[in-house]
């Protein structure tokens, strides 16, 4: 149950301050960058780099199209966080490139914490929506600058079998991919690969490949490519299945664009 959820929107930039169960489930990949200030409860973060426990007052930096799962270990209603979403922005291209290079977790620094607190105070005050939007647009480059300056303090690591399978999937995403084929390439049994992958990533190989392909398709359709062509280019041999999975993942049909 959500205790509270407050937002500031500034064009394509979104800041959310919330406590309680998240409504955004099943989005292990997304086409926008994300910065999470984890404030309450404990969680376990799964990613393409590895998995690690997350404690309060931790900053999580997630570049766009990067697999991640944040599983709350305590009471879901106590999950307390600030979340910042934003796409690639031409005016901030250099800062984004320097800050959002790969997923990492780190204890939050004083300057970053101060900027998030300022956004929270803005949300809880009586400022107009226009004023809130201006403050959010001003805060984002400052946050990115601080993140780039502080750098990452910890990057989790994965089991070598999973690292190799992720590398192969990334290079052959549009081809026919099965657990058996991956297992043969890595010279391990299919059962060992499936078990190790699920244990390390908290997702099956099939679901990982499906979600990664759908994310690729979403980006290409958003850039104007025809849905039928995109389906084939992203490894879907059956358009009806692609249509069904795409609509389930994004809530719109492929032909609707976005």
Image (cartoon, rainbow, N blue to C red):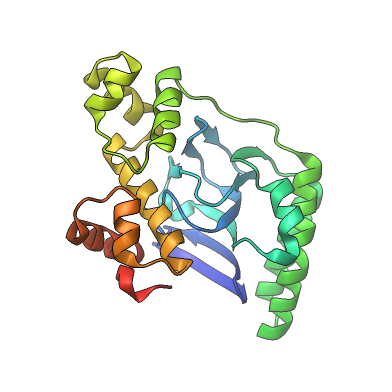
Residue 252 shows in the view: no
The outermost residue toward the top is 187
Q: Residue at x 62, y 73 (%)?
A: 8
Q: Is residue 249 left or right of residue 133?
A: left
Residue in the foreground of this view, choosing between 16 and 239: 239
Does residue 1 lie above or below 258 as drawn? above
Q: Residue at x 57, y 72 (%)?
A: 7
The x and y percentages for residue 92 are 74, 61
Indicate the quadrant containing the N terminus: top left, top right, bottom left or bottom right: bottom left
The x and y percentages for residue 45 are 49, 38
Does residue 127 lie above or below 15 as drawn? below
Q: Residue at x 39, y 27 (%)?
A: 165
- Residue 132 is drawn in which quadrant? bottom right
- Residue 231 is drawn in which quadrant? bottom left
Residue 116 shows in the view: yes
Residue in the foreground of this view, choosing between 212 and 21: 212
The x and y percentages for residue 183 are 28, 21
The x and y percentages for residue 243 are 24, 63
Residue in the foreground of this view, choosing between 113 and 170: 170
Q: Residue at x 32, y 61 (%)?
A: 229
Indicate the quadrant containing the C terminus: top left, top right, bottom left or bottom right: bottom left
Total marks drawn?
Answer: 0
Q: Is residue 85 left or right of residue 134?
A: left
Q: Is residue 204 left or right of residue 44?
A: left
């Amino acid at each position: 149950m959500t205790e509270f959820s407050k937002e500031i929107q500034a064009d394509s930039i979104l800041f959310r301050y919330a406590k309680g169960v998240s409504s955004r489930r099943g989005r292990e990949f997304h086409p926008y960058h994300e910065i999470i200030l984890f404030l309450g409860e404990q969680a376990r973060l799964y990613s393409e780099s590895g998995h690690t426990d997350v404690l309060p007052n931790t900053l999580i930096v997630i570049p766009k199209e990067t697999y991640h799962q944040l599983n709350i270990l305590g009471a879901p209603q106590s999950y307390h966080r600030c979340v910042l979403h934003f796409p690639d922005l031409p005016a901030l291209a250099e800062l984004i490139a320097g800050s959002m290079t790969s997923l990492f977790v780190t204890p939050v620094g004083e300057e970053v914490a101060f900027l998030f607190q300022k956004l929270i105070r803005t949300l809880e005050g009586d400022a107009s929506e226009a004023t809130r939007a201006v403050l959010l647009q001003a805060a984002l480059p400052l946050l990115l600058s601080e993140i780039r300056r502080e750098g990452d303090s910890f990057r989790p690591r994965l089991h070598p079998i999973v690292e190799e399978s992720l590398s192969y999937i990334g290079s052959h995403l549009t081809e026919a991919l099965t657990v058996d084929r991956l297992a043969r390439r890595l010279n391990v049994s299919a059962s060992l690969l499936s078990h190790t992958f699920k244990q390390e990533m908290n997702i099956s190989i099939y679901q990982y490949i499906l979600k990664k392909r759908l994310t690729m398709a979403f980006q290409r359709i958003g850039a104007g490519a025809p849905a039928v062509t995109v389906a084939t280019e992203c490894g879907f041999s059956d358009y009806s299945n692609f249509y069904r999975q795409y609509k389930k993942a994004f809530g719109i049909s492929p032909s609707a664009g976005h």
